[in-house]
Image (cartoon, rainbow, N blue to C red):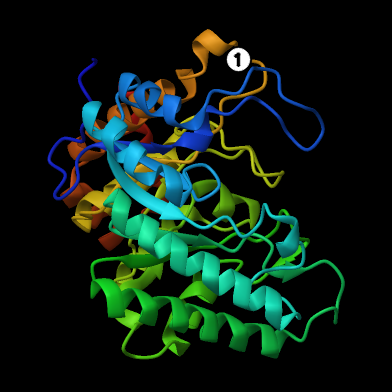
Amino acid sequence: MPTPYTLKSKPGITGLGAGVWNLGPGGDPFGGPTREPIPILDRLPLLAEAGMSLYEAHDVEIPAADAEKAVKIAVAHGLKCAMYTPSFFADRIFKDGAMTSNDPAIRAKALENAKLAVDTTHVLGAKTMVFWNGREGFDFVLAKNGRDSFKRLVEGFNAVAQYSQQKYGNEIRFAIEPKPNEPRANMYLANVGEVLYLVSRLDPAVQPIFGVNPETAHSRIAGLDYTWDVELCLEAGKLFHIHLNSQDGQRYDQDLPFGYTEPLKDLALLVVLQDAAYEGPICFDVKAPRTDDPKNIADILKVSADNLIALWNRALAVDRNKIAQFRQENRATALSGYLAHCLYGS
């Protein structure tokens, strides 16, 4: 078994993680699979072989019935579950949203699924349960009442958190993952700011266990700066989890290898995380491309991890005093040149 990747001088969790969905069969909205699908539990050893210490999964990938088996396989390969998430976007019943559906029966089903996911999160030993906004949004204006939809989100998250606290105390924290579009044309909780506002409207008793799981590509799709999104989460004390990848402009969600498109900005992000002494997990949300052969399916993880380790070490070598001096002298261009030097060398 290869030695797991670790981040030097990082407090808290030093290993890296990835989702089981990262090793998919290569399908996309425009074409079917290009590889035979690998059974989900068989992907856990592949993550370990790629140097991961952590794994992540949706409830449709590791359902409650398979949770204990997943734990045994993970332990045997030195893996821990970093996060678990309910898949409100896959089932046809949630075609127009889950918590924000206009149908109260569907909202009740969403709450039931979320509670089951809380229990499975506990079985897997994960400390974080992530909510991606999935189909919580709209394609046509006035198809939903936005004020009512927001109230439904508040009520839903309050109910899930209260259920979790009653059974497990504050063992499990919840991280909401914003995304501006796809699959809906317009998404609720589309960016970090909206998520933080939602958290501020939750019951004060559950607010401490709610935070954010920002993702590089999702910020880029919205035309936002990912580093600032992360800084905002850190300032609020709400950076509970983090997903790294790359995005080649404002296209569909590409899930490219971390470090591929904007390495200088990625370097700056890691400086921010190091200076904030971020203790939580750092995981990849990448996708093995359609063109890769089955034998090379884990390349997406290895490339992302190698890039991260290289950039992390370069970030450690960045002279913070020089950054402070450039700021004091109002030399932003010179600062960018210094970062480029730290990235590319002499």
Residue 31 in percent (x, y) is at: 80, 28
Q: Could you tell whether 219 is left or right of 199 in the image?
A: right
Of 74 and 344, the residue lying toward us: 74
Q: In which quarter of the image is the C terminus?
A: top left
Tell me which residue sits at (67%, 52%) in the image: 90
Of 240 and 41, the residue lying toward us: 41
Residue 104 in percent (x, y) is at: 70, 83
Vertical order, 265 against 301 (above or below): below
Tell me which residue sits at (40%, 37%) in the image: 18
Of 344 and 337, the residue lying toward us: 344
Q: Could you tell whether 311 is left or right of 198 in the image?
A: left
Residue 185 in percent (x, y) is at: 78, 61
Q: Could you tell whether 120 is left or right of 248 in the image?
A: left
* Residue 39 visible in image: yes
Of 110 and 253, the residue lying toward us: 110
Vertical order, 214 against 5 (above or below): below
Crowd band around label 1 with a 10 angstrom C-alpha radius: few (<14), some (14–19), many (20+): some
Q: Could you tell whether 250 is left or right of 314 in the image?
A: right
Which amino acid lies under the numbered mark 1 shown in the image of this protein? Asp
Is label 1 in a helix, a strand or a loop? loop
Tell me which residue sits at (65%, 72%) in the image: 188
Residue 202, located in which quarter of the rendered image?
bottom left
Tell me which residue sits at (43%, 24%) in the image: 42
Residue 142 in percent (x, y) is at: 85, 82
Q: Mark 1 points at which residue?
A: 292
* Residue 337 visible in image: no
